[in-house]
Amino acid sequence: MLPGIVTLSGSGPPAELVHSLDDLTPARDLLPKRRKYFIGVLDPAASIEFTRGCPWDCVFCSAWTFYARSYRHRSPEAAAEDLARIRESGVFIVDDVAFIQREHGYAIAKEIERRRIKKQFYLETRADVLVRNKEVFRYWKRLGLEYLFLGIEAIDEEGLQAHRKRVTVNRNLEALECARELGIVAAINIIADPSWDEPRFTAVREWALAVPEIVHITVNTPYPGTETWYTESRKFSTNDYRLVDVQHAVLPTKLPLEEFYRQLVQTQEVLNQKFMGWVALGRTLGLALGFLAQGQTNFVKMLWKFNSVYNYRRQIADHHREAQYRMHLPEASQKRVDPSTLYVIQPHSLSRQMGQGRAASQ
């Protein structure tokens, strides 16, 4: 059995790291419907990975638990070589946090510039990383960085502390100003907690309407393997695996469930008002016509998908469907969890395997 693959009973060999990220070569040619892959206005788009892991420890996230808060990267040469093989004009950089190390970000950028690779880029990063490494992002803007995703998560200090984001509201606002100055379109995420009441939803809606950025609203969801999976004091209201998707409430809501979903969709409607339908088409008409001329319909179709994706009646109905797979929930919530017990790769194993990888590459 492959390392890291477990059965439903939980048995299987422990996970292992690849010796070097440079050894990974995505088999993009095995995916026959590549023209169906897109993100935003990058239509079509491929994905690429420059780094793996995250040194932060947000309570809702599992990225840091996979690799024990480590952060590894591909060599600039291997990253640029992989990028050169991508035939799509749009590229989504799927790093959990892009350009934490400014020198690495610069090195890849210089390789791209040297090879004269022309792409449009979309990436994910943190607000504090953007502010601290602003010049790296400026460099990437010249190379084609058009969009970035920022996990703002909360609009007040209390919410940020609850998520253990290790960033302040002022720094988040500074990051948004930074993206605007650089001319990079920012999409941000806000986590809606099941404890929210109507005034709280109203406050978030007003904030989302007041900023020019694309604002996504997702539901606070304790994923298996995250800290909140074990520490969440409220009992899960369902163990239906299908509902664990950050769009359904799997914890008891303060509002009646139907009203919670109604408020959620009304808040998500801000996205529709600002960036979808005829409003978006008016802003991007030339771009949309260009896509259609090339036979690319993904972006244009997306503009009218809001009502079919965000619908509180459908969300309520989902709770009444028969569960096909029921998750094994924690027996009892814990006040505190030893972070090391959440690591998929233990630190001692991580250090040994990373050392072997460095030796093999020399």
Image (cartoon, rainbow, N blue to C red):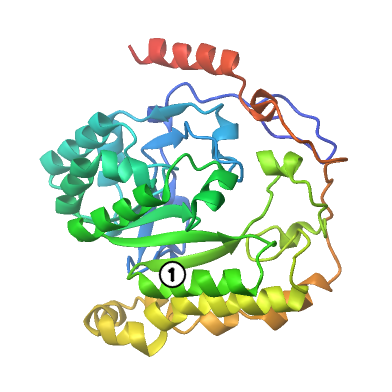
Q: Residue at x 48, y 66 (%)?
A: 216
Q: Residue at x 47, y 58 (%)?
A: 155
Badge 1 element? helix
Q: Residues within 10 Å of mark 1 (few under 14, many from 20)?
A: few
Q: Nearer the viewer, residue 212 or 141?
A: 212
Residue 120, above or below 331: below
Q: Residue at x 81, y 34 (%)?
A: 10
The residue pinned by badge 1 equals 207
Q: Which image quarter holds the N terminus?
A: top right
Q: Nearer the viewer, residue 274 or 168?
A: 168
Residue 183 shown left or right of residue 304 in the figure: left
Q: Which image quarter holds the C terminus?
A: top left
Q: Residue at x 49, y 50 (%)?
A: 157
Q: Quadrant of residue 208?
A: bottom left
Residue 58, above or below 222: above
Q: Amino acid at mark 1?
A: Trp
Q: Nearer the viewer, residue 54 or 209?
A: 209
Indicate the position of residue 17 as horizontal and vertical percent values: 54, 25
Indicate the position of residue 194 as horizontal and vertical percent values: 69, 62
Residue 108, above or below 209: above
Q: Is residue 86 visible?
A: yes
